[in-house]
Amino acid sequence: MINQLAPLPEFLVKKYNNWKSTSYLKNQNHFRNLASFGQNPSSMIISCCDSRVHATSIFGVDAGEFFIHRNIANLVPPYSPDGENHGTSSAIEYAIKELKIQHLIILGHTDCGGIKSGHSLHSKNLNPDYEFINKWLSILLPAFNNIEKNITKKKQIEQLEEESIKISIINLFSFPYIKKAVENKDLSVHGLIHDIGSGEIKFLNPTTKNFEKL
């Protein structure tokens, strides 16, 4: 109920006031132009909900440059226009059909809780408390099937981080308008993994099909 809402925490009020009097004030013309003329981002980033992943900081871009969608483990489901609620698919559709972005980037990261949970789920260690997460992480099954099983759990999870992005890219190409846009050279698709601790980024090399340091 709305009347049960709490006041905004004081630390957020202070952070907002600091932003408004510094960053906003310095760039107010840019923000006013965005408000007047709308957004025209060049790229869409599909990243994880993890609070440690901050795509705009990683690439040093300003407001209006990236169309960003976050979900658990930065996954893309297969194309499935079945009338259900599809937050990720609708964000992709808007980015391609309305914003006409030129680049679509799946940005994974190290130490991903979603990937770890997906590994547990498909290792038959189901967490019954997850009402929505387990269904969402079922997207990872093809990726899980691709990883080696005779290595340590840590190595399996690292492989799953990479394989999950490959599977999401495969799923992206099941969207007819994604496939068409790439074939027409109107869109490029990329897979990246951000190392939270070192700051390094690995990219999926389309020639070797392996992740390599940028």
Image (spheres, rainbow, N blue to C red):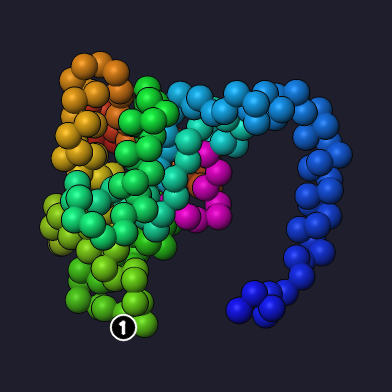
When asked about the image quadrant of residue 37, the answer is top right
Q: Position of residue 136 (x, y in %)?
A: 29, 63
Q: Position of residue 176 (x, y in %)?
A: 17, 34
Q: Is residue 114 left or right of residue 184?
A: right
Is residue 79 within the magenta segment?
no
The answer to whether 133 is drawn above or below residue 97 in the figure is below
Q: What residue is drawn where x is 39% and y is 30%? A: 98
From the image, give the main secondary structure of the stretch colored magenta.
loop
Q: Position of residue 62 (x, y in %)?
A: 62, 29
User: Which residue appears farthest toward the bottom when viewing the image?
Assistant: 128
Q: What residue is drawn where x is 77% and y is 28%? A: 28
Q: Quadrant of the N terminus?
A: bottom right
The answer to whether residue 193 is visible is: no
Q: What residue is drawn where x is 30% and y is 23%? A: 187
How many marks overall?
1
Q: What residue is drawn where x is 25% and y is 78%? A: 125
Q: At label 1, which amino acid type do we have?
A: Pro
The one nearer the camera, 118 or 169, is 169
The one nearer the camera, 173 or 146, is 173
The answer to whether residue 14 is visible is: yes
Is residue 49 within the magenta segment?
yes
The answer to whether 156 is drawn above or below residue 179 in the figure is below
User: Which residue appears farthest toward the top when viewing the image?
Assistant: 185
Q: Is residue 5 left or right of residue 96?
A: right
Instruction: Give the residue at mark 1.
Output: 128
The answer to whether 149 is drawn above or below residue 159 in the figure is below
Q: Quadrant of the C terminus?
A: top left
Mark 1 Cα within 10 Å, few/some/many (few <14, many 20+)? few
For the record, the magenta segment spans 48-55
Q: Position of residue 29 (x, y in %)?
A: 75, 23
When asked about the image quadrant of residue 149, the answer is bottom left
SS for callout 1:
loop
